[in-house]
Image: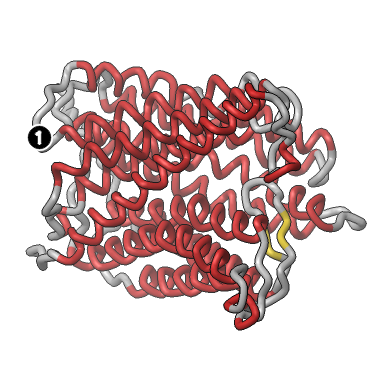
Amino acid sequence: MMDQNYSLPIPASSARRLAIGWLYLALYSLIGAGLVVILILIARMPVIHDLIPWTGSFKTALVIHVDLSVLVWFLSFAGFLACFNLRSGSDKVGLIALGVATTGALLITFSPFLGVDAPYMNNYVPVLENGAFFLGLALFLAGVGVMGLYALWMTEPSEGWSNGAGALRFGLRTGVGILVLSILFWVWSYLVLPKGLEGVLYYEALFWGGGHVLQFTHTQLVIVAWLWLAHASGGTIPLTPRVAAILFLLGAAPVAVAPVLHAAFAPGDPGFQSGFADLMKYGGGVAALPAGLAAFVAWKNSHSTSSVEPLRVALILSLVLFGVGGVIGFLIQGINVTIPSHYHGSIVSVTVAYMGLTYHLLPAFGMPLPHIRWAAPQLWLYGGGSLLHVFGLAWSGMLGIQRKTAGEAQGLETLPKKLAMGLTGVGGFIAVLGGILFLILCYQAIRHRQRPTS
């Protein structure tokens, strides 16, 4: 009978320090995403504003917030998960990669104060067109890319697909491999971008292909998190490890089309844009749907106890948000806030799963949670608030409110539009409170850190 223990042991001592470093960087990115907004507000205050050599803007705040809360958070957590596949040995290359990525993340955070305020709200990786930002972005992606290659090279010997751990390791390998490919696609796009593209059109074309490919990494890794959380919750997962591994293979398979699209169309061409959009639209759920259903069945047959309740909450909220985000994706028509409604559902789905996995793994790294009773309420705040935010955006999109607008530009002249955006704001505020509570709980766990035995 196959071993269906869908969990992985804590990395060996040589990789444990590296794993903790990537986890710290992931948590920093969430702190930085919030602090940069506060710094921007301070920079716009009378008197104080004159003391800071930067005027700030709504779009600048949004650029840094999105890059830290999505790009840096997700890829740093991917680096953390990749450490679970490392075999014993020197971790010097991994530590160098972590150092480079951390330097890049810090530069991204403070780049508004180190160069011109020229934000572009393109998809996937919005940018500030200044040297400090681009240096930070290049360093961060280089560090993540080297870590990905290192994890693939130094991976534990294959256990096959005969047990749950082997299936999860395979899922991690495919997710990390796709991550490396997405960075290479960005380099490819940079080298072949047609002349004449400027501003937001240039950056949209640059990050479009690799950005869509990167979503397959997030999907592979969130499936790893679902299976891990379902098992840790005490549920019985109705998937053999072999079937789970096949799902990971199917989830990665659509990426094979990406090089064909990239070779056939120049970045920015209509065929390039629609091809990658369709690739994600029709290929992104190939593995997620059956894996999500299996995780839901496991959640149904698990039993709530104080120790596993945060894991069960994280799992069900992640599954619901992923499903809601996917359904809304098929409702997109035009350039309105239905688009951010779709990707907020998907993004928060991954974030909630990672939060639950963090709660599960911190004690194993010698960081016990002194106030674990607050973990489930924190997840309900963050996930529930995000659901309200997503529904508010979807409703607003149906009413024709355009994306990437603020203030009077939103055109909130009718009561339904005001109610829809009000729901969006209330949900977002509740989610922010949940996010702050998550960081507080993690900080308290880190303060109580004990040195685990090797």
In the rendered image, which quarter is residue 184 located in? bottom right
Most foreground residue, 432 or 343:
432
| 314 on left or right of 348 | left
Residue at 67%, 46% (x, y): give it: 123
Identify the image quadrant of the N terminus: top left
Q: State whether residue 11 appears in this view.
A: yes
- Give above or below for 109 relative to 226: below
In the rendered image, which quarter is residue 22 located in? bottom left
| 42 on left or right of 279 | left
| 8 on left or right of 95 | left
Q: Name the residue under label 1.
A: 306
Most foreground residue, 7 or 443:
443
Question: Horizontal and vertical percent for residue 368?
Answer: 12, 55
- Give above or below for 216 relative to 449: above
Q: Which amino acid does label 1 sit on?
A: Ser
Question: Horizontal and vertical percent for residue 193?
Answer: 82, 54
- Give above or below for 2 relative to 56: above
Most foreground residue, 91 or 379:
379
Q: State whether residue 150 appears in this view.
A: no
Identify the image quadrant of the C terminus: bottom left
Residue at 41%, 47% (x, y): give it: 432
Residue at 26%, 16% (x, y): give it: 297
Question: Horizontal and vertical percent for residue 192?
Answer: 80, 55
